[in-house]
Amino acid sequence: MTSSNSKTSSRKAHTAVNHRRVFTVLSSLVATLALTAGILLLLEGQPITSAGPYMMNLSNNTQNWNSVIRASAPLRKGRWNYIIVYQSGSLSGNSTELSEGKDIGGMIAPRNAGYMTQGADFHFVVDNSRNGLGNPDGYVQRGLAWQDQLSTTPYFSWPYLKPHHYSVYANAVGVCIIGDINRKDYSASQIRSTVSLVQALERKLNIPNSCVKLQWEIRGQATARQRAFGREFHRLLRR
């Protein structure tokens, strides 16, 4: 009798262990599938609206950043003192259209408009999927101004004021993201590329994080969406 009870207790304990093991395996599988789904959404360039997804997969970009920031003219580290990140204000476009003034701030710029610049030769432009050139979302274009090491970064209130050739930011590296954060989030690919590009420039030019500014941070006029993006952007730079 004692032997029979002992066998029954052993079977019950074994069954309980098996149930716990199955539960553990299933829980791990569900968590893995959820994480994989999140990563796939980021890789597809889906817009992100919360702080969490910003922290994932920052290194996933096929561009070689040392090659991207290479210039034709000799690169003088002491020449550049700031990095300013702009946005185009439009939901599509590319570096050529920005430099020609075809699409500025979401509107067509009149060729003789005195209150607007006729274009901006940004050193780097971060494309979105609507760039018209066939570039992948998040692709970074290197401008001729960077190739020739020219100071062409526009005023922080671009496109509404003249260039700041005589200001403290006259020798800033200008990076422009195609998009308008007030109307639509930048894609995950754009954010990854922008952060990676800026970090590569910081290392190459010995520019500290404190000298990386978003356009609206200098202006002192930022919307709630711009402030939220700015907080996450600076957190990512410090990683």
Image: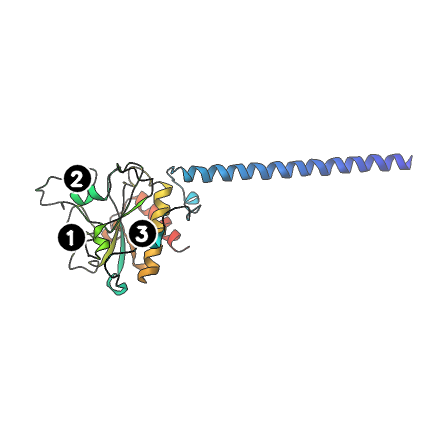
Mark nearer the N terminus (3 vs 1): 3
Of discs 1 and 2, which sits in the foreground?
Answer: 2
- Of 151 and 168, the residue lying toward us: 151
Q: What amino acid is at disc 1?
A: Pro
64 lies left or right of 121: right
Reading the image, the residue beneath label 2 is 102
Reading the image, the residue beneath label 3 is 68
Q: CA distance from mark 1 to mark 2?
A: 18 Å
- Residue 110, placed above or below residue 66: above
Q: What amino acid is at disc 3?
A: Val
106 lies left or right of 29: left
Q: Position of residue 72 (x, y in %)?
A: 24, 56
> Which numbered circle lies on residue 116?
none
Under tag 3, what secondary structure?
helix
For disc 1, the neighbor class at 10 Å (few under 14, some 14 to 19, many from 20) is some
Q: Residue at x 59, y 39 (%)?
A: 28
For disc 3, the neighbor class at 10 Å (few under 14, some 14 to 19, many from 20) is some
Q: Are marks 3 and 1 in contact (CB under 8 Å)?
A: no
Q: Position of residue 102 (x, y in %)?
A: 17, 39
Under tag 1, what secondary structure?
loop
Reading the image, the residue beneath label 1 is 163
Q: Quadrant of the N terminus?
A: top right
Q: CA distance from mark 3 to mark 1?
A: 25 Å
